[in-house]
Image: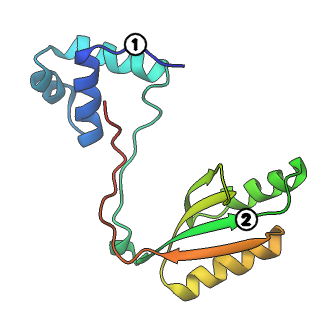
């Protein structure tokens, strides 16, 4: 479901994606409005689900999570029970930052952030002990070239 947004809404969203800790006064000043209309627009975008939540973005390396792996998973299992067990396993693993079901030869791709290769292996061992997986390929990211949570508004 797409929500109608005007140029002012898009400016507000851009500013919030840049830094959600900005005051309403600052956002209103930067979009050329006053505080109450900006607050009303933000409230409406929260109610309609355009804004899901507000959070902070942490530096993984500052926290000692220096290794980022992209994990390609092929499965020969496609039953509902297997998928439920697989999703349950993924959701309880904090190392899994993203998980996507794909079209094509690979069934799933995971973005996993851990301290090092040994920590990845521990994650891998838990994963394969909890769900049957046909094939797993782990790709170590050598360099993060671009990472953003900001959507093009």
Residue tagged 1: 4
Q: Is residue 27 left or right of residue 144?
A: left
Q: Is residue 70 left or right of residue 35?
A: right
Residue 10 pos. (x, y %): 27, 23
Q: Is residue 127 left or right of residue 39?
A: right
Residue 111 pos. (x, y %): 53, 63
Tell me the quarter of the image containing the N terminus: top right
- Which badge, 2 or 1, comes first in the chain's sequence? 1
Residue 149 pos. (x, y %): 37, 47
Secondary structure of the residue carrying numbered label 1: loop
Residue tagged 2: 74
Q: In this rendering, is residue 57 above or below 64? A: above
Question: At x 57% / y 88%, what residue is drawn?
Answer: 118
- Residue 12 numbered mark, or none: none
Residue 92 pos. (x, y %): 68, 60
Q: Give the distance between the C-alpha atoms of the residues marked 2 and 1, in whole angstroms.
A: 39 Å
């Amino acid at each position: 479901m797409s929500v109608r947004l005007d140029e002012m809404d898009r400016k507000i969203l851009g500013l919030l994606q840049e830094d959600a800790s900005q005051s309403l006064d600052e956002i209103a000043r930067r979009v050329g409005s006053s505080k109450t209309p900006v607050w009303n627009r933000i409230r409406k975008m929260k109610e309609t689900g355009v804004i899901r939540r507000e959070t902070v973005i942490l530096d993984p390396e500052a926290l000692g999570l220096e290794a980022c792996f992209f994990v390609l998973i092929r499965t020969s299992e496609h039953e509902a029970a297997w998928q439920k067990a697989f999703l349950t396993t993924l959701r309880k693993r904090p190392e899994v930052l993203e998980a996507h079901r794909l079209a094509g030869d690979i069934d799933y791709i995971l973005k996993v952030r851990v301290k090092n290769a040994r920590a990845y292996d521990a994650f891998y061992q838990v994963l394969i002990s909890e769900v049957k997986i046909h094939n797993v390929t782990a790709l170590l990211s050598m360099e993060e070239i671009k990472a953003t949570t900001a959507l093009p508004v």
